[in-house]
Image (cartoon, rainbow, N blue to C red):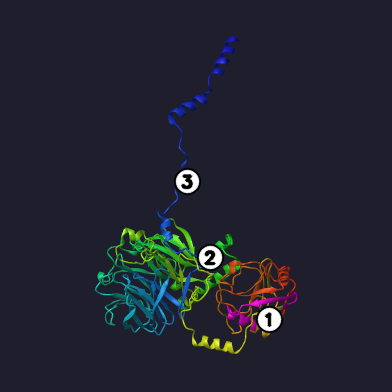
């Protein structure tokens, strides 16, 4: 018994066996590292990203816009600090970049037909334009003068200068619109071509672009085939400085596989990357030397619709309007989608390209969208051109005392990065800078939309007839089945919209119209004789343009505004808001305010409605509208 007790005491005084083994294992192995999967992934960061972004426009609204007589189709910025714009009617304008903004220089009635293409040489000294009038015009940019003219004998589809700076021959390539042939001309020489490429493509070319860094040309045709070739300096052969021999070693067949037609191409400043836009709405970035795909950005409507379903990126009305605009882009009329371009910034780390939500700025290194430009505008931007230069103020040497002085004449010019854009069906081009538009500015020259064109004869006649017959007023009373609503109208700011409203009212067009759409806490809508939101037309029989004014905003309740189905689609329907709706600014024309009967408008907005159609269960009608 004593032996058993002693053994039990010895047992309890010994540590457990497993504990001893654990301690010995710890002494030998030591602490284990954390599992590999628990380590956070290292985030990609572009060095000096903020510096690069500071050299790009930042604004959500354009600062200025300038006019052409017809829709602006092309815009180019040259290395010599000029801006060149062209419009459908064959007009070409030269502008000079200033320390802030641009200044008009010269206007050419260059062609009798539609301008099909515009190209600026790599050294910024020459410009070429082609047109449906079967002519090629050459301009000296520095002296802004036309120096040569070619009668091509065929309608051209695209053109491009394909010579390096200092070359003896200023070669320009021109593709035929209906054939696969590319003709090469001496821009300073005779009208006959110096070379012809007849078997390079099997279909008409959609674009020709020259990479001045590697002295190589890339062209793309309607079937999606991309070809590399050289100009006169390389005897028009396949370039020897690329890192592939056969296209099967590249990703250049992506367009053929996707059955997409490439529409535009741009090179990075160092020539090592290229970005291509195509009809499948994908923006593809390739490495120039290898032809391998680097980035692909899907901007198709299906992507945006899925995004909107997941989390509303815009109010439903605004999103539907933008979708309608995108569908209009796909129509073959005037090939609007083919005019859209993407551009690189000076560093080559960012690309800028237009989308339905605005202009995206994408960091190619981190593969992220880092900025949206112009996303508060209701305009669909298309062709882009970027200026990031710094204008020289003086070449004279400055002493330290002069540099330290506060003399503004001696201060160095500050960079003024400017993004210049065309837009869908707009006879204007738009400038985005580091400065937001000044909505409070008043007086001559304070408007951001500059009227630099004289009115046409039709516009003058319309203005004359409007003065002989008083068709507008500044006040009205809407008599409804629930009471009267008194309205103040703005004929000076919105002459066409108010005229449409007043004439329709006097002629009884709105009599017995129902309020077909009522949304509580938002607005009440009428003006459709059909009563279902699909009818109505203007007094001219067709849709008319928007009339936005910086002082007329949706910044208060009881605002009278035009309903539409997209930009410049006003007809007869209008609505009255019951709350501030700032997201409708620059999308719907504000042409009046409610000055009396607010309680009537509010009461109508409280009506019970069908949740599917927003139509009141009990009809509320406009009896008539009295114009005072």
Please tell me whether mark 1 or mark 3 is closer to you in this view. Answer: 1
The answer to whether residue 485 is magenta is yes
Residue 510, label in figure: 1
Circle 2: element type:
helix
The x and y percentages for residue 138 are 33, 79
* Position of residue 458 in the picture relative to residue 295 (left or right): right
> Residue at (41%, 78%) from the top-left corner?
86
Indicate the position of residue 447 as horizontal and vertical percent values: 51, 74
Q: Give residue 372's position: percent from left, percent from top.
A: 49, 63
Q: Nearer the viewer, residue 101 or 574?
A: 101
| Residue 302 tag number | 2
Q: Earlier in the sequence, mark 3 or mark 2?
A: 3
Query: Which stretch did the figure color magenta?
Result: 479-502
Task: Bin the neighbour count of mark 1 within 10 Å (Cα to Cα): few under 14, some 14-19, many 20 and up.
Answer: many
Regarding residue 260, the answer to whether it shows in the image is no
Disc 1 to disc 3, how far (Cα)?
A: 65 Å
Q: Are marks 3 and 2 in contact (CB under 8 Å)?
A: no
């Amino acid at each position: 018994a004593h032996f058993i007790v002693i053994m039990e005491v010895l047992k309890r005084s010994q540590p457990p066996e497993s504990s001893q083994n654990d301690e010995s294992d710890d002494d030998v192995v030591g602490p284990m590292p954390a599992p590999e999967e628990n380590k956070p992934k290292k985030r990609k960061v572009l060095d000096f990203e903020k510096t690069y972004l500071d050299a790009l426009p930042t604004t959500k609204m354009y600062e200025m816009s300038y006019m052409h007589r017809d829709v602006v189709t092309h815009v180019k910025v040259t290395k010599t600090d000029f801006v060149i714009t062209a419009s459908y009617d064959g007009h070409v304008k030269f502008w000079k970049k200033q320390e802030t903004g641009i200044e008009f220089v010269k206007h050419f009635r260059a062609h009798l037909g539609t301008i099909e293409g515009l190209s600026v040489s790599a050294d910024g000294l020459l410009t070429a334009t082609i047109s449906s009038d079967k002519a090629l015009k050459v301009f000296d940019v520095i002296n802004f003068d036309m120096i040569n003219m070619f009668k091509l004998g065929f309608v051209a589809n695209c053109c491009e200068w394909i010579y390096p700076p200092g070359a003896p021959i200023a070669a320009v390539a021109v593709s035929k619109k209906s054939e696969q042939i590319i003709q090469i001309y001496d821009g300073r020489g005779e009208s006959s071509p110096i070379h012809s490429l007849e078997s390079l493509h099997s279909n008409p070319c959609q674009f020709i672009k020259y990479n001045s860094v590697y002295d190589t040309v890339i062209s793309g045709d309607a079937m999606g085939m991309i070809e590399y070739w050289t100009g006169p300096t390389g005897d028009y052969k396949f370039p020897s400085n690329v890192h592939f021999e056969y296209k099967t070693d590249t990703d250049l067949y992506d367009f053929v596989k996707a059955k997409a037609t490439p529409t535009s191409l741009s090179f990075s400043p160092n020539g090592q990357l290229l970005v291509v836009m195509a009809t499948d709405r994908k923006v593809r970035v390739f490495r120039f030397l290898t032809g391998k795909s680097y980035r692909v950005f899907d901007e198709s409507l299906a992507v945006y619709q899925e995004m909107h379903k997941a989390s509303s990126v815009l109010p439903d009305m605004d999103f539907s309007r933008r979708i309608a605009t995108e569908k209009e882009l796909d129509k073959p009329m005037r090939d609007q989608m083919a005019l859209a371009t993407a551009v690189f910034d000076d560093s080559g780390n960012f690309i800028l390209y237009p989308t339905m939500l605005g202009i995206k700025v994408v960091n190619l290194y981190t593969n992220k969208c880092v900025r949206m430009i112009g996303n508060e505008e209701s305009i669909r931007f298309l062709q882009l051109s970027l200026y990031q230069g710094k204008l020289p103020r003086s070449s004279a040497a400055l002493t330290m005392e002069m540099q330290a002085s506060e003399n503004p004449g001696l201060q160095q010019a500050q960079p003024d990065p400017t993004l210049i854009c065309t837009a869908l069906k707009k006879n204007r081009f738009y400038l985005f800078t580091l400065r937001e538009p000044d909505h409070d500015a008043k007086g001559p020259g304070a408007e951001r939309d500059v009227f630099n064109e004289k009115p046409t004869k039709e516009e003058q006649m319309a203005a004359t007839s409007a003065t002989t017959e008083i068709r507008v007023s500044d006040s009205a009373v809407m008599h409804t089945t629930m009471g009267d609503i008194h309205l103040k109208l703005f004929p000076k700011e919105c002459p066409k919209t108010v005229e449409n409203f007043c004439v329709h009212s006097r002629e009884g067009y709105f009599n017995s119209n129902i309020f077909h759409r009522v949304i509580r806490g938002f607005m009440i809508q009428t003006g459709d004789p059909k009563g279902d939101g699909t009818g109505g037309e203007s007094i001219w029989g067709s849709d008319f343009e928007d009339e936005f004014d910086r002082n007329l905003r949706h910044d208060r309740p009881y605002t009278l505004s035009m309903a539409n189905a997209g930009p410049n689609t006003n007809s007869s329907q209008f609505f009255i808001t019951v709350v501030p709706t700032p997201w409708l600014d620059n999308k719907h024309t504000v042409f009046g305010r409610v000055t009396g009967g607010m309680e009537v408008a509010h009461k109508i907005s409280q009506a019970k409605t069908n949740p599917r159609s927003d139509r009141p269960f009990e009809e509320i009608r406009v009896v008539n509208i009295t114009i005072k």
